[in-house]
């Protein structure tokens, strides 16, 4: 975020990539970043391939978080044009925003998911923030749910979204806490409680944010932070995992970010 490097967090033996943390702005990131063409190809053709995947992974399992995001939006806006970045199949916009009050738009790289979103009456932009052409000063609300860690050039991409907002418009960001993601995927206990055994360096996430690095990014992008609050995690299939996720969210909710 500030073009500086920090200490090594994770390295894979025999692989050139590492996870490092910047001592200046606090963000952790993959270094070097993976080939953008490979990442784009993955999102276009591989990461969403059927309706069950769309509805479950990007809908039902995310229900509590999406409800919270929708509540944040509707508390401050009752109608207008809304753009969802990474809209998947349009579950979020279709379920929580009445078409009589809202004109709905989505950015989505997956060709399969894009067709599903369009079938729900959502105006779609195929691609990513850096590749689509958005109108200036057009949207009342932009939502970025779970997508910010994938932004390759987060400063630039947030600036593009800010330009697409009307004056006084609202951007709502939702993302996993970087320290928790790192812990879940790099420690034995974290892996046992739902993190799995896939390396962070094999994940499409590029950046891992905490409160400090997120505030730094938003200030660099010219955005004013009005509120930071914990977000519920995804629904978990196993009871123990669900209990742990709910407990973590409850504890996070009692602590000021």
Image (cartoon, rainbow, N blue to C red):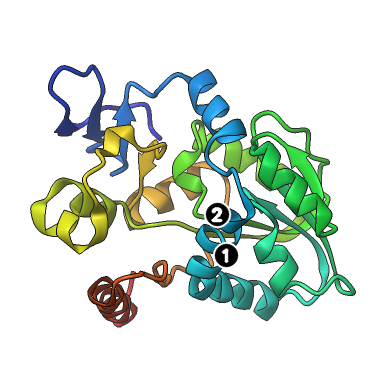
Residue at the disc numbered 1:
59
Going by the image, does 251 lie left or right of 57?
A: left
Is disc 1 placed on a helix, strand or loop? Answer: loop
Q: Residue at x 50, y 49 (%)?
A: 218
What residue is rendered at 44% in x and 44% in y? 149
Disc 1 to disc 2, C-alpha distance: 9 Å
Q: Quadrant of the C terminus?
A: bottom left
Q: Residue at x 31, y 81 (%)?
A: 250
Q: Which mark is residue 31?
A: none
Q: Can you identify the residue that label 2 sits on?
A: 53
**Mark 1 vs mark 2: which is more N-terminal?**
2
Image coordinates of residue 145 in percent, x first then y, are 55, 57
Kindly indicate whether the residue at mark 2 contacts the one at mark 1 (C-beta within 8 angstroms).
Answer: no
Using the image, determine if residue 204 lies above or below residue 52: above
Q: Picture coordinates of residue 18 (x, y %)?
A: 23, 27
Q: Answer above or below: position of 52 versus 131.
A: below
């Amino acid at each position: 975020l500030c073009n500086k490097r920090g200490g090594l967090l994770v390295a894979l033996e025999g692989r050139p990539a590492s996870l490092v943390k910047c001592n200046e702005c606090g963000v952790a990131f993959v270094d070097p970043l993976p080939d953008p063409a490979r990442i784009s190809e993955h999102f276009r053709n591989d990461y969403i391939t059927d309706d069950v995947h769309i509805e479950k992974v990007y809908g039902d399992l995310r229900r509590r978080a999406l409800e919270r995001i929708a509540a944040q939006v509707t508390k401050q806006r009752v109608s207008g044009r809304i753009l969802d970045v990474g809209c998947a199949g349009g579950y979020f916009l279709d379920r929580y925003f009445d078409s009589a009050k809202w004109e709905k738009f989505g950015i989505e790289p997956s060709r399969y998911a894009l067709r599903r979103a369009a079938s729900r009456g959502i105006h779609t932009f195929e691609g990513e923030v850096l590749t689509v052409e958005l109108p200036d000063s057009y949207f009342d609300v932009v939502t970025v749910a779970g997508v910010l860690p994938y932004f390759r050039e987060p400063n630039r991409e947030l600036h593009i979204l800010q330009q697409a907002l009307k004056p006084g418009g609202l951007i709502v960001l939702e993302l996993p806490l970087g320290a928790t993601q790192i812990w879940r995927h790099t420690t034995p206990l974290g892996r046992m409680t739902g993190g799995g055994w896939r390396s962070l360096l094999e994940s499409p996430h590029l950046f891992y944010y905490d409160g400090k690095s997120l505030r730094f990014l938003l200030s660099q992008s010219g955005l004013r932070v009005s509120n930071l609050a914990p977000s519920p995690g995804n629904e978990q299939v196993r009871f123990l995992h669900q209990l742990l996720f709910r407990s973590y969210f409850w504890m996070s909710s009692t602590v000021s970010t």
